[in-house]
């Protein structure tokens, strides 16, 4: 089977984009793994599929496959590339585009400087939504959030939350020495996370600036992770480490994350439910185009 593709990247998080607007794209998990393979395929952290939407008010369907071949819920860096792709192909000229993932609706907006802002929707903190099994664990409360010890984590504590996909975030003193290769895969598949988890390692430089590395579920460490950046900032805000607008330095580039405060009239219930949407802004670039036999 011949597959035409476009290679794109956002802050070094790289993608193979497939066009399902004119003909359906149907990949097996094995074909997705081959496409993402950096030696035998094109090479990518994730595969993105652009499809028509059947939902009223939604412009496109946005599907995401990890390099492991699994379809997943969310990818913020990929969403920025998605918008650049559909605008370049002439599928839309809208200033604001809405796309549906498997469990969410995202709003995408291109900025005058060429960067793209994604409304990532609100975070979720309920353990059942992540999902996270805290039975028998005793958390340590800081600010208005909890840090959780995990078995076989070498004493590390994690803030757990969902950005539409599961995240566990731990603070480190020096990002270059963070145990990403050792601890990342161990926590990703930890028994406390029924659907596995993305593992973030954050170094706080100031209340407005962090360094971040993320071991992604089903992909390993990537040069950047959009949902991971959002999760790290949200956790940092609730733990009292960060302000609500933060520059996030990743190994692949710069991201900006903003989590606006909930208006006072919205009340404590809105805060408990995750508050306002998280806004992710960063680059999205074309790399090359081609075709491959799968």
Image (cartoon, rainbow, N blue to C red):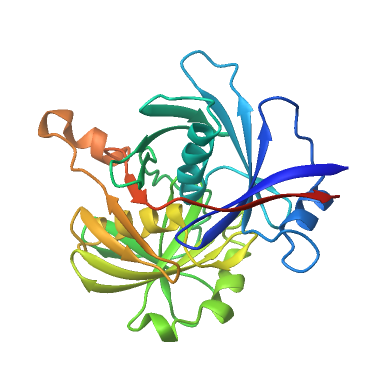
Judge by depth and name the residue closer to the eye, 7 or 142: 7
Name the residue furthest right. 1
Relative to 136, say whether 30 is above or below.
Answer: above
- Left of 288 or right of it: where is 37? right
Left or right, 259 with respect to 79, comes to left
Between 187 and 107, the one lying in front of the other is 107
At horizontal 79% and vertical 41% (from top left) the residue drawn is 27
Question: Residue 49 at x, y = what percent?
Answer: 64, 38
Q: Quadrant of residue 124?
A: top left
Residue drawn where x is 76% and y is 50% of the image = 32
Relative to 173, does residue 27 appear above or below in the rendering? Answer: above
Q: Position of residue 16 (x, y in %)?
A: 65, 50
Q: Point out the image quarter for the N terminus.
A: top right
- Image height of 237 relative to 263, above or below: below
Q: Residue at x 50, y 29 (%)?
A: 99
Q: How many marks?
A: 0
The image quarter containing residue 112 is top left
């Amino acid at each position: 089977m011949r597959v035409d593709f476009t290679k794109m990247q956002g802050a070094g998080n790289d993608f193979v984009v497939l066009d399902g607007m004119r003909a359906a794209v149907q990949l097996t998990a094995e074909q997705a793994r081959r496409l993402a393979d950096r030696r035998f395929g094109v090479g990518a952290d994730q595969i993105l599929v652009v499809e028509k939407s059947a939902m009223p008010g939604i412009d496109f369907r946005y599907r995401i496959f990890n390099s492991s071949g699994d379809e997943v819920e969310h990818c913020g860096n990929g969403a920025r590339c998605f918008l650049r792709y559909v605008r370049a192909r002439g599928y839309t000229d809208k200033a604001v585009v809405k796309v549906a993932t498997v469990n969410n609706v995202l709003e995408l907006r291109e900025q005058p400087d060429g960067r793209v802002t994604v409304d990532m929707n609100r975070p979720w903190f309920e353990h059942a939504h992540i999902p996270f099994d805290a039975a028998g664990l005793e958390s340590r409360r800081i600010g208005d959030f909890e840090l959780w010890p995990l078995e076989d984590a070498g004493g590390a504590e994690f803030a757990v939350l969902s950005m539409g996909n599961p995240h566990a975030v731990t603070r480190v003193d020096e990002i270059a020495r963070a145990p990403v290769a050792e601890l990342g895969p161990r926590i990703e598949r930890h028994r406390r996370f029924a659907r596995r988890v993305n593992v973030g390692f954050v170094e706080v430089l100031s209340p407005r600036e962090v360094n971040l590395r993320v071991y992604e579920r089903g992909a390993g460490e990537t040069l950047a992770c959009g949902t991971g950046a959002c999760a790290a900032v949200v956790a940092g805000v609730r733990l009292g480490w960060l302000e609500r607008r933060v520059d996030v330095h990743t190994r692949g580039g710069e991201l900006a994350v903003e989590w606006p405060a909930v208006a006072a009239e919205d009340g404590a219930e809105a805060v408990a439910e995750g508050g306002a949407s998280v806004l992710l802004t960063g680059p999205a670039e074309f790399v090359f185009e081609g075709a491959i036999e799968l």
